[in-house]
Image: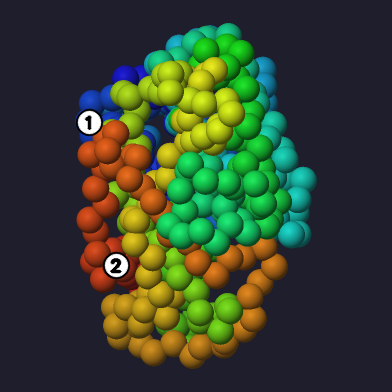
Amino acid sequence: MKVLVTGTAGFIGANLAGRLLGAGHEVIGVDNLSPYYDVALKEARLARLIGQSGYLDVRADIADRDRMMALFAEHKPSHVVNLAAQAGVRYSLKEPFSYTHSNIDGLLSLLEAARAHPVAHFVFASSSSVYGANRQMPYSEHKSAEHPLSLYAATKKANELMAHTYAHLFAIPTTGLRFFTVYGPWGRPDMAPMLFADAILAGRPINVFNHGEMRRDFTYVDDIVAGIEALLPLPPEVDPSWDPDAPDPATSGVAPYRILNIGKNRPEALMEFIETLEKALGREAIKNLMPMQAGDVPATWADSGDLMRLTGYAPETPLATGIARFVEWYVDYFRVTL
């Protein structure tokens, strides 16, 4: 495959690009190195990819429609994985327009490029955040996700609707992946593992929202990218059993389209996550128990059965193993002495 991966300076994108290259595929890596968080970390992720056989490094904004069109025309990718986005639920309360630029305009420019230069499979990142006010656990792609609680989640839901429209109008085989809390080495500084590790080692309190009564479907990054790799050669088709009188939101009777959860399929308590991190660091956290933040939800739980049946996806990394690997990377990258 020749895979155009956007967000290759990002956490999941860098890991996916490395895995695809290791399997012998070509990767066209696109990233604009947004300063949303430490650009040096993004550069360090890219440094592990640049120079590898089969990797093309492209510095560009996916919302630049002319650049994306030219990129597709010149390199003719066979597959697309769009992971570039303005991330973060809480940041969307402060900088809403950055979300429409990256998440709405960005996806649209890629869909237009795929319309002009067809691909075998267009995969894009959605999010477990789209489930919003839905409390029916585990979260199923076949149930309603019509009540997002943040602008970030709303843009991801809009992405799903946009993708279905283009799949229908222009026969672009399209899969949206709803990611659940991904963690591991080379993770994002705005996510709990690194925020907590930074604070614990500095002796600062960590903010624990909803007074610790939170559960997350923590999924190790290697399991995530293995699932994406397995999915790429399996584009969706129009579902002949789809009933327009009882429409299934995860499939379509008028488009080669589907939505899949990708998570561990096992929610774990936030306090257990913190305790596991404390053990790996050899330090105890000072916990600042706080109320729920606006736009957040108390629990996530992925029903990943469809992805498992389709690809054999089997996330197996235990939380203790994943956190130990994260801490090992953290200590090495930041030159920390425990």
Residue occupying image coordinates x 37% and y 70%: 268
Check the picture and name the quadrant holding the N terminus.
top left
Residue occupying image coordinates x 43% and y 39%: 260
Residue occupying image coordinates x 67% and y 51%: 147
Q: Nearer the viewer, residue 245 or 10?
A: 245
Give the image quarter of residue 158.
Answer: top right
Q: Amino acid at mark 2?
A: Leu
Residue 54 lies left or right of residue 75; in this view the side is left
97 up-or-down from 192: above or below: above
In percent of width and height, residue 59 lies at 55, 32
* Residue 198 visible to the viewer: no
Which element is circle 1 on? Answer: loop
Which element is circle 2 on? Answer: helix
Are there few (<14), some (14-19), or many (20+) residues within 10 Å of tag 1? few
260 up-or-down from 38: above or below: above
Name the residue tied to disc 2. Answer: 319
Q: Earlier in the sequence, mark 1 or mark 2?
A: 1
Q: Amino acid at mark 1?
A: Ala
Q: Which mark is residue 41?
A: none
Name the residue tied to disc 1. Answer: 23
Please identify, in this view, whether the residue under mark 1 or under mark 2 is nearer the observer.
2
Q: Nearer the viewer, residue 323 or 48?
A: 323
Are there few (<14), some (14-19), or many (20+) residues within 10 Å of tag 2? some
In percent of width and height, residue 62 lies at 61, 30
In percent of width and height, residue 140 lies at 46, 48
286 up-or-down from 237: above or below: below
